[in-house]
Image (spheres, rainbow, N blue to C red):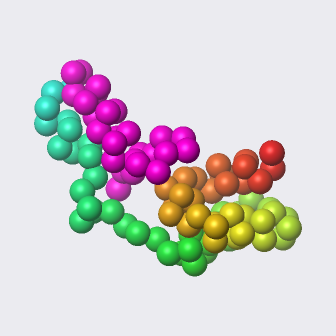
Amino acid sequence: MLRIKSPGSKQPEQYAAKMAASAAIFYGAKFIETFLPSESTRMELSADEVKEYWHDYCQRKNVSAELIARGDRQIEADPEYWADHTMAELLKSLSA
């Protein structure tokens, strides 16, 4: 599944539509149909599912317990945002 979200945006569909329209010039109109995700193909993740993925990522990267806890709080504050971003981005945001 492909979900595109512009940095800081809460409207990924509009951003994806602009990207697809630009790309359609190069790839043809059929590209738009395959590029834009439909509501039926999206996988919604709960905060607990995102945290599970976060914990698995941290275990592989040997992340400290303090950073794991801070990441959990970030995920709980906005699980939808972190479901659309990589765990590397979350780690980087916590390390800054």
Q: Is residue 38 above or below residue 22?
A: below
Task: Return the x and y of residue 47 as percentages of the image width and height.
Answer: 56, 74
At 13% from the left edge and 36% from the top edge, which residue is drawn?
30
**Image location of residue 63, percent across then percent down:** 80, 62
> Residue sitting at 57 percent across and 78 percent down?
48
- Going by the image, does 3 lie left or right of 36? right
Residue at the extreme bottom: 48
In the image, 6: left or right of 94?
left
Residue 68 visible to the viewer = no
Which corner quadrant holds the C terminus?
A: top right
Q: Does 50 sit left or right of 29 as displayed?
A: right
In which quadrant will I find the N terminus?
Answer: bottom left
**Residue in front for this viewpoint, 12 or 26:** 12
Q: Residue at x 32, y 33 (%)?
A: 18
Q: Is residue 11 magenta?
A: yes
Image spot of residue 35 (x, y percent): 26, 43
Q: Residue at x 46, y 71 (%)?
A: 45
Q: Nearer the viewer, residue 9 or 87?
A: 9
Work out whether 87 lies above or below 13.
below
Q: Is residue 36 magenta?
A: no
Quadrant position of residue 20: top left
- Which range of residues does the magenta coloring cover? 1-26
Quarter of the view holding residue 55: bottom right
